[in-house]
């Protein structure tokens, strides 16, 4: 009888599959503690083989842990003693690429850098560039709701997903998303499920042509509040930068990031690096006792705070030549008014070394310490408070610094780096204190690293009663409970979330009751993507920057529930669509845009074909649709008039300026159609859509 898939029970294969890159596991390994060993490692090659493995595991009651490249840092792919590890790397097919729709199909085991290299040869890019790109897989990105370093422009990974194929023990092979079964809530439940509901085997992804131009620059900002204001103004001005990356004063000072490169290498700010090199020259027996930064973190944090001042902000744009020129000119004008222009060198230096951080942590373990990172996210009004709270919580046990990246109109992510003494109890105290500070400050516990086992309790507390949505899916998709037990969500004591304060003006959010007419203009602005009902258009019918629902609140089983603590939270699946269908009462959405507004219209033969051409030209209108048969195009923000000129040049006969009035989105449901279909009423860069069942 042929085996259901290739597998191994050899000790070397079981040991290789026992760990991921969780620093807590690395600390154990360095101190001689073995990881839990799986009983068997499987390498299925297609959905049928995955289904056969899952059936056999369910019948035998054997836990299954899905693994890709093993680069996860939260213990999500760490083996369970006696489990089966289902390794996806044999599912490594790329293609076909559809150059007309700008989409590509990719199997889950494909290495991220290999995908990007393959697309580059075809003249395209995915735009997803996490630090782990060379040692992570596409399936892992989907399972953990990854975010790359250009997320401000291209969106987080889930924004790129048009459809997915997955296999679950209870449901077999399922296809969700565009052209598949189920709703947006079904796809949202799968993305971020971290192998607890199903094994993702294939994805259909949106891609973009390789950028014609890239603009990068560094700015010295006088302090953190000024830098945060600069970032927020860029994002709420519809300027769509590709990179917005702020280093806090400590990180800026230690790394000498605002100095020219030759000074950076020898300047006084690199004293820690030079001191540690001297430690390396000492006999090995002394290294573990002389690493002062690890032994006295509280003291060193106070020293760094005393000498640090100012911070570096790296900003960049990429894409169409003319659009980059228009957006970067307005962005530079804004930044010049708030900080000091350091030229292109700091930005180009960051770009050249942007993936190097993933390979710099091991020397800390060699010196008898630990090093780890934690990424959280929150609204603009909570950013400084969360930053201060986490630093205060971590400072007694670890040296801490941070940078802020992955910013969006409603808020941003803070990426903390910390190092401490290599004691397991110290490590656990550091994480417990950090996650408690995040929860208490109202932020999300994870932005793009996922949950795994490290953050399972904190993530469970964050989503609260909404975990009922995941549990219902689990009961259907994995009735025997064999997929990744103890990961993602665990039992916690029932608690009610703190009262949700109204959005502050800087958050740029409006709120309203679910079921009310949400197209009514909110005070101080208007919806960025005005939809009348929850949960709005599915993700495959909108672009990455069109995020209709930021937060959702309601009652689940009579208990209050609040989702949307931080932008693009990766604390498990996106449960907002589920809550929208099961007791949502209140929602918040983006309304703020700084600067001018411009709107024009044109009567053209195929309006949705022209609309797609505008989106493919890298223009991102705030309003794009039909009104009385005419194509309407609107821009907002300081670059509105510049972009209007570029758009008008791309519309047959040009655009005629008309008074601004926001367009509602078609209610749907919508189905794909040719862009010259007379019934076409909505478009993305990939596809035109018409109302379901409607023909000309």
Image: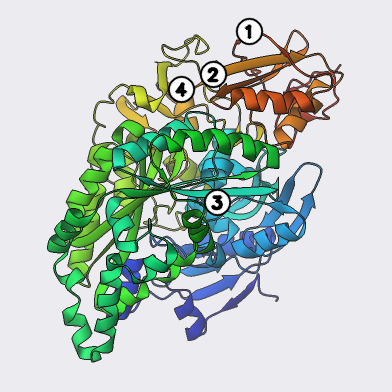
Whether residue 413 can be seen here: yes
Could you classify mark 1 by the number of other residues whose Cα lies within 10 Å: few (under 14), some (14-19), or many (20 or more)? Answer: few
Q: Residue 52, percent across and down?
A: 63, 62
Q: Which residue is mark 1?
A: 659
Under tag 4, what secondary structure? loop
Color scheme of the displayed model:
rainbow
- Tell me the number on the disc at residue 142: 3
Q: Are marks 4 and 1 in contact (CB under 8 Å)?
A: no
Image quarter in which the N terminus is found: bottom right
Using the image, determine if residue 59 lies above or below residue 32.
Answer: above
Closer to us: mark 4 or mark 1?
A: 1
- Tell me the number on the disc at residue 596: 2
Q: Quadrant of residue 28?
A: bottom left
Closer to us: mark 2 or mark 4?
A: 2
Separation of disc 3 and disc 2 at Cα? 37 Å
Could you classify mark 2 by the number of other residues whose Cα lies within 10 Å: few (under 14), some (14-19), or many (20 or more)? Answer: few
Using the image, determine if residue 226 lies above or below residue 259.
Answer: above
Q: Which residue is mark 4?
A: 592
Under tag 1, what secondary structure? loop
Q: Are marks 3 and 4 in contact (CB under 8 Å)?
A: no
């Amino acid at each position: 009888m042929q085996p259901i898939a290739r597998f191994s029970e050899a000790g070397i294969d079981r040991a290789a599959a026992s760990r991921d890159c969780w620093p807590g596991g690395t600390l154990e390994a360095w101190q001689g503690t073995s990881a839990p060993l799986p009983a068997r490692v499987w390498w299925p090659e297609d959905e049928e083989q995955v289904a056969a493995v899952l059936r056999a595991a369910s019948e035998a009651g054997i836990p299954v842990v899905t693994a890709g490249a093993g680069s996860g840092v939260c213990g999500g792919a760490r083996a369970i003693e006696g489990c089966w590890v289902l390794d996806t790397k044999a599912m490594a097919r790329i293609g076909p690429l559809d150059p007309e729709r700008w989409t590509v199909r990719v199997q889950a085991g494909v290495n991220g850098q290999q995908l990007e290299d393959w697309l580059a040869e075809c003249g395209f890019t995915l735009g997803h560039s996490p630090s782990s790109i060379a040692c992570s897989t596409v399936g892992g990105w989907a399972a953990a709701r990854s975010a790359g370093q250009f997320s401000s422009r291209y969106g987080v990974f889930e924004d790129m997903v048009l459809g997915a194929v997955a296999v679950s023990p209870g449901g077999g092979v399922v296809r969700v998303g565009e052209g598949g079964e189920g709703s947006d809530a079904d796809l949202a439940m799968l993305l971020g499920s971290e192998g607890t509901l199903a094994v993702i085997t294939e994805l259909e992804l949106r891609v973009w042509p390789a950028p014609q131009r890239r603009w990068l620059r560094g700015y010295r900002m006088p302090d953190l509040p000024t830098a945060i204001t600069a970032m927020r103004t860029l994002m709420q001005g519809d300027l769509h930068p590709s990179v917005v990356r702020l280093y806090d004063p400590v990180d800026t000072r230690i790394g000498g990031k605002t100095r020219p490169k030759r000074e950076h290498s020898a300047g006084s700010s690199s004293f820690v690096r030079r001191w540690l090199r001297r430690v390396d020259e000492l006999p090995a027996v002394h290294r573990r006792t002389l690493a002062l930064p690890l032994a006295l973190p509280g003291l060193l944090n106070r020293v760094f705070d005393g000498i640090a001042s100012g911070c570096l902000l790296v900003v960049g744009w990429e894409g169409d030549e003319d659009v980059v020129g228009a957006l970067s000119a307005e962005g530079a004008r804004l930044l010049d008014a708030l900080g000091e222009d350091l030229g292109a060198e700091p930005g180009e230096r960051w770009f050249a070394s942007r993936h190097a951080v993933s390979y710099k942590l091991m020397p800390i373990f060699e010196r008898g310490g630990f090093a780890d990172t934690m990424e959280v996210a929150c609204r603009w009004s909570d950013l400084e408070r969360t930053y201060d709270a986490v630093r205060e919580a971590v400072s007694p046990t670890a040296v801490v610094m941070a940078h802020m990246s992955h910013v969006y109109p409603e808020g941003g992510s803070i990426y903390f780096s910390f190092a401490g003494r290599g004691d397991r109890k110290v490590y656990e105290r550091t994480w417990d204190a950090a996650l408690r500070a995040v929860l208490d400050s109202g932020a999300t516990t994870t932005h793009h690293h996922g949950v795994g086992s490290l953050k399972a309790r904190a993530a469970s507390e964050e989503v609260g009663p909404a975990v009922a949505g995941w549990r219902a899916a689990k009961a259907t998709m994995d009735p025997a409970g064999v997929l990744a037990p103890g990961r993602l969500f665990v039992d916690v004591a029932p608690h009610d979330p703190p009262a949700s304060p109204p959005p502050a003006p800087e958050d740029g959010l409006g709120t309203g009751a679910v079921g009310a007419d949400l197209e009514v203009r909110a005070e101080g602005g208007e919806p960025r993507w005005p939809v009348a009902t929850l949960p709005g258009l599915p993700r495959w019918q909108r672009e990455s920057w069109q995020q209709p629902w930021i937060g959702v609140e309601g009652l689940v089983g009579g208990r209050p529930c609040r989702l949307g603590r931080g932008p693009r939270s990766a604390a498990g699946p996106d449960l907002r669509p589920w809550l929208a269908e099961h007791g949502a009462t209140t929602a918040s959405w983006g309304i703020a845009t700084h600067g001018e507004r411009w709107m024009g219209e044109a009567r053209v033969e195929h309006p949705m074909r022209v609309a797609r051409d505008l989106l493919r030209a890298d223009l991102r209108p705030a309003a794009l649709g039909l009104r009385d048969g005419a194509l309407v195009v609107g821009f907002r923000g300081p670059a509105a008039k510049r972009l209007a000129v570029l758009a008008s040049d791309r519309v047959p006969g040009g655009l005629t300026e008309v008074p601004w009035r926001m367009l509602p989105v078609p209610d749907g449901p919508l189905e794909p159609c040719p862009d010259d279909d007379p019934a076409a009423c909505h478009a993305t860069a990939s596809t035109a859509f018409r109302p379901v069942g409607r023909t000309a």
